[in-house]
């Protein structure tokens, strides 16, 4: 087994050269041994290699005595829902999320859908297999049974809004040939919206485009249709449908921190004074909107395990990352790719405004660079580079919650290293476009010097 398939938050690699059935079987065995699990859930996405990897993972699990409930082909957030709702000891979703078709992998969770990560679980499973320390198969093998969760999941997602107030918006949807094509029809058939549905035929070959809306080329179809249809909004999902992305009526892609700000507003209208967790890379639009509605905003380090833990500790109602991961207290603190879509439509309906109109005040006040990556010579160079940047901006307010964050009154930035590569990732925001461009170039020049 290639140990490099174990990443910071999941298992992922090229099939079959990096991850194959033998690896899946070993990970299934190590997973239930690590959790001391007696019953787990297994789901899979639409990738061509997912059925055999799911079966091999299940074989590894039952060989160590755990019962497996097979939920078949489902979205990742449906697996989270199944684990929490049906009180499994853990669960595995066979998926490579938004990666190209040659990849596959696994997202692993323990009880209540709390994720395993490199800091908690994944490294132990990796080392158990690499060190040939797997416990021997047991004499009493576990059983495999099948179950479904789609109907209950759809009702759960709809419970976050009042469908009766949603207006008949003109909406373009792009499932990217992924798992959005399973769930979105069941939701939008219950709403009065007029929908144009792109790539809803589930196909792990991704015949139209890759299921990664963060890449501009993969958004071309939905942007063109939003403009051509004069739509009010476009919504796209990644491959395993645990993230959704938004296009406004002008065809502009909306950053995840602006969506986090709108979702925070949606929750604070429902439950004033609630706590909202936000990503330290995010626009100050988030904390400013939370403050304007009397809520409590808490900055957090990047990563779903850190978000879910902090939300549990603070009873936060909602948390959002700039990459399109949105977490909900009443969804077992797990991320979800469909609840945000419904909440944004409900907010547009309550306000009687288009998405473009809701975003217009933010676009006049907050100017963001987006994430810009720079490759350094080696991982060893990262600490010294962060120290160099800190020294250059020593007169600013600084903190090192995750990488280095620097704040002035009219601009701020975060520089954080990649978990796995010699990369520095810059996110910067300023109060004018000119200041943003100047400071972005200034910081980049320092990073790349």
Image (cartoon, rainbow, N blue to C red):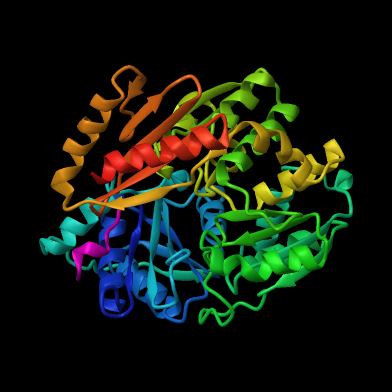
**x and y, in percent, of residue 250 in the image:** 74, 55
Residue 19 point in image, percent of width and height: 29, 73
Q: Where is residue 150 in the image (x, y as percent from the top left)?
A: 65, 62
Q: Which residue is drawn at 33% across and 61% down?
A: 11
| Residue positioned 79% across, 68% down in the render | 228
Query: Principal SS element in the magenta part?
Result: loop
* Quadrant that contains the N terminus: bottom left
Depth check: 328 or 422 in front? 422
Name the residue at the left extreme: 131
Q: Which of 254 and 365 is in front in this view?
A: 365
Q: Is residue 217 above or below residue 374?
A: below
Q: From the viewer's perspective, tell me whether residue 193 is left or right of residue 300.
A: right
Residue 47: image location, x then y, percent: 47, 76
Is residue 122 a member of the stretch shown in magenta?
no
In this rendering, the count of numbered labels is 0
Image check: 393 left or right of 357? Answer: left
Q: Which of 111 and 249 is in front in this view?
A: 249
Determine whether, in the image, residue 198 is placed left or right of residue 10.
right
User: Relative to 328, does residue 239 appear above or below in the rendering?
Assistant: below
Task: Say which quadrant the C terminus sits in.
Answer: top left
Q: Is residue 141 visible?
A: no
Q: What stretch is highlighted in magenta?
A: 1-8
Q: Can residue 408 be seen at all in this image of the molecule?
A: yes
User: Relative to 132, does residue 37 appear above or below in the rendering?
Assistant: above
- Residue at 35% across, 53% down: 37
Residue drawn at (37%, 55%), measured in percent from left and top?
38
Q: Nearer the viewer, residue 215 or 295?
A: 215
Residue 4 counted in the magenta span: yes
């Amino acid at each position: 087994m290639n140990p490099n398939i174990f990443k910071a938050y999941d298992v992922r690699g090229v099939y079959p050269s990096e991850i194959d059935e033998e690896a899946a079987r070993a990970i299934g065995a190590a997973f239930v041994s690590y959790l001391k699990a007696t019953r787990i859930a297994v789901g899979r996405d639409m990738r061509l290699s997912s059925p055999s990897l799911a079966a091999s993972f299940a074989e590894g699990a039952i060989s160590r005595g755990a019962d497996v409930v097979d939920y078949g082909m489902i979205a990742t957030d449906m697996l989270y829902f199944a684990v929490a709702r049906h009180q499994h000891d853990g669960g595995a979703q066979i998926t490579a999320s938004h990666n190209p078709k040659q990849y596959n992998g696994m997202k692993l969770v323990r009880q209540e859908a709390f994720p395993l990560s490199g800091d908690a679980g994944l490294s132990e499973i990796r080392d158990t297999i690499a060190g040939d320390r797997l416990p021997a198969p047991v004499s009493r093998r576990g059983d495999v049974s099948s179950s479904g969760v789609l109907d209950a999941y759809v009702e759960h997602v709809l419970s976050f809004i009042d469908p009766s107030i949603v207006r008949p918006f003109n909406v373009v949807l792009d499932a990217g040939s992924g798992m959005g094509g399973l769930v979105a029809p069941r939701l939008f058939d219950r709403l009065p919206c007029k929908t144009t549905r792109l790539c809803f035929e589930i196909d792990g070959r991704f015949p139209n485009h890759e299921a990664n809306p963060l890449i501009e080329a993969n958004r071309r179809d939905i942007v063109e249709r939003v403009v051509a249809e004069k739509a009010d909004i476009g919504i796209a999902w990644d491959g395993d449908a645990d993230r959704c992305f938004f296009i406004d009526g002008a065809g502009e892609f909306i950053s995840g921190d602006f969506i986090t700000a709108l979702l925070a507003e949606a929750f604070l209208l429902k439950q004033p004074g609630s706590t909202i967790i936000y990503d330290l890379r995010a626009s100050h639009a988030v904390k400013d909107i939370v403050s304007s509605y009397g809520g409590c905003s808490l900055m957090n380090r990047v990563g779903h395990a850190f978000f879910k833990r902090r939300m549990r500790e603070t009873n936060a109602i909602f948390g959002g990352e700039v990459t399109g991961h949105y977490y909900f207290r009443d969804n077992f603190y797990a991320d979800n790719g469909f609840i945000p879509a419904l909440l944004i439509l409900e907010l547009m309906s309550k306000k009687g405004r288009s998405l473009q109109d809701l975003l217009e005040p933010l676009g006049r006040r907050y100017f963001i660079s987006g994430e810009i990556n720079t490759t350094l010579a080696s991982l060893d160079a990262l600490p010294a580079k962060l120290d160099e940047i800190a020294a250059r901006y020593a007169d600013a307010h600084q903190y090192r919650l995750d990488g280095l964050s620097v704040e002035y009154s009219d601009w701020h930035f975060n520089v954080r290293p990649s978990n796995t590569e010699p990369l520095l990732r810059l996110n910067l925001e300023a109060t004018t476009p000119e200041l943003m461009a100047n400071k972005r170039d200034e910081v980049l020049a320092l990073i790349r010097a």
